[in-house]
Image: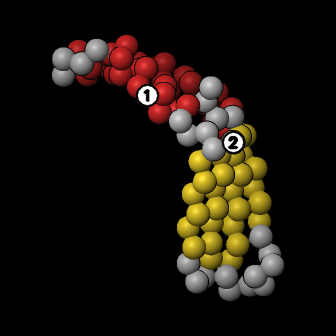
Amino acid sequence: MIPLAAVIAVRPGWRSSNLRLWIPVPLFLVWLLALPFLVLALPIFFIACLASRMDPFRALWVLWQLLCALRKTHVSVEHREASILVHIF
């Protein structure tokens, strides 16, 4: 199943180190907003796959597996001025 929620935590370093901004991101809304564009891009994707002699259904399966593998992803970027943490549920 694709991830449906994420949390982004931002901690500015130039302020108090105890201040942390948590931003919950409902990814299911992002998927719903992207769906019309993905449906419009699907014929172009199929033509590009067929032109490069690649099975379009296998390519879609690989992309689906890649999206499903994003669950439980933690990305942390730290700098002396700020730090950002992204956690995908």
Between 31 and 41, which is closer to the camera in this rendering?
A: 31
Element under disc 1: helix
State which quadrant residue 62 falls in.
Answer: top left
Between 32 and 65, which is closer to the camera in this rendering?
A: 65
Which residue, given by chain and number where applicable, does mark 1 sit on?
A: 63
x, y percent for residue 28: 68, 32
Q: Residue at x 69, y 34 (%)?
A: 4
x, y percent for residue 74: 60, 54
Q: How is the image coloured?
A: secondary structure
Amino acid type of the residue tagged 2 in the rendering = Phe
Q: Looking at the picture, does residue 40 appear above or below residue 33?
A: above
Q: Looking at the picture, does residue 34 appear above or below residue 20?
A: above
Q: Residue at x 77, y 70 (%)?
A: 20
Q: Residue at x 69, y 67 (%)?
A: 10
Q: Work out which residue is located at the far left of the displayed protein and give it.
A: 52
Quadrant (top left, top right, bottom left, bottom right) of the C terminus = top right
Element under disc 2: loop
Q: Which of the marked residues, 1 or 2, is nearer the chain's N terminus? A: 1
Between 11 and 73, which is closer to the camera in this rendering?
A: 73
How would you rate the neighbour count of disc 1 (Cα within 10 Å): few for under 14, some for 14-19, many for 20 or more?
A: few
Which residue, given by chain and number where applicable, does mark 2 sit on?
A: 89
State which quadrant residue 29 falls in.
Answer: top right
Taking the image as drawn, is residue 22 in sight?
yes
Amino acid type of the residue tagged 1 in the rendering = Leu
Q: How many marks?
A: 2
Q: Looking at the picture, does residue 80 appear above or below residue 75?
A: below
Quadrant (top left, top right, bottom left, bottom right) of the N terminus = top right
How would you rate the neighbour count of disc 2 (Cα within 10 Å): few for under 14, some for 14-19, many for 20 or more?
A: some
Relative horizontal placement of residue 87, taking residue 40 as reference (left or right) = right
x, y percent for residue 11: 70, 72
